[in-house]
């Protein structure tokens, strides 16, 4: 099975999620460091839709100016546009497999799609 992880190597939860993926037998893991190679606005929209969460639920508020900018209560279009232009606003890690997408906080949520 193939898994794609939108990863930040400086994040402990992201590193733990990646370790789970790499330790899973038969898993082909694609690692995308999203701060270097951000997903498009369209890809973010698809990931959140497939995860069953709103863009606001995928918004990183810790260590960002998201709250000061009013993003937690902004509409989806504004949030997605902000994330696409400033990937640090994307909460991590996001993992996509053929079984679905999860925002893996905590990292054990990844087991739901393996």
Image (spheres, rainbow, N blue to C red):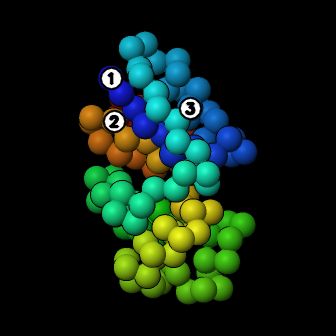
Which residue position holds label 2? Answer: 97
Q: CA distance from mark 3 to mark 2?
A: 13 Å
Residue toward you, 3 or 62: 3
Q: Relative to 27, does residue 101 appear above or below in the rendering?
A: below
Q: In the image as oriented, which residue stretches furthest toward the top?
A: 25
User: Residue at position x 43%, y 37% from top?
Assistant: 4
Return the disc, 3 or 1, that comes first in the chain's sequence: 1
Cβ–Cβ under 8 Å for marks 2 and 1: yes
Q: CA distance from mark 3 to mark 1?
A: 15 Å
Q: Residues within 10 Å of mark 2 (few under 14, many from 20)?
A: some
Residue 13 in view: no
Tell whether 45 sits left or right of 92. Answer: left
User: Residue at position x 47%, y 32% from top?
Assistant: 30
Which residue position holds label 1? Answer: 1
Which residue position holds label 3? Answer: 18
Q: Relative to 27, does residue 13 appear above or below in the rendering?
A: below
Quarter the C terminus occupies: top left
Residue 27: where, in percent of width, then height? 41, 20
């Amino acid at each position: 099975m193939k898994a794609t992880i939108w990863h930040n190597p400086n994040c402990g939860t992201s590193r733990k999620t990646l370790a789970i993926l790499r330790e899973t037998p038969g898993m082909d893991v694609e690692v995308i460091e999203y701060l270097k190679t951000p997903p498009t606005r369209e890809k973010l929209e698809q990931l959140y839709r497939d995860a069953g969460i709103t863009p606001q639920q995928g918004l990183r508020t810790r260590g960002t100016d998201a709250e000061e900018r009013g993003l937690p209560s902004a509409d989806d279009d504004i949030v997605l546009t902000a994330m696409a232009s400033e990937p640090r606003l994307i909460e991590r890690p996001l993992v996509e497999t053929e079984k679905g997408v999860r925002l893996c906080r905590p990292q054990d949520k990844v087991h739901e799609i393996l």
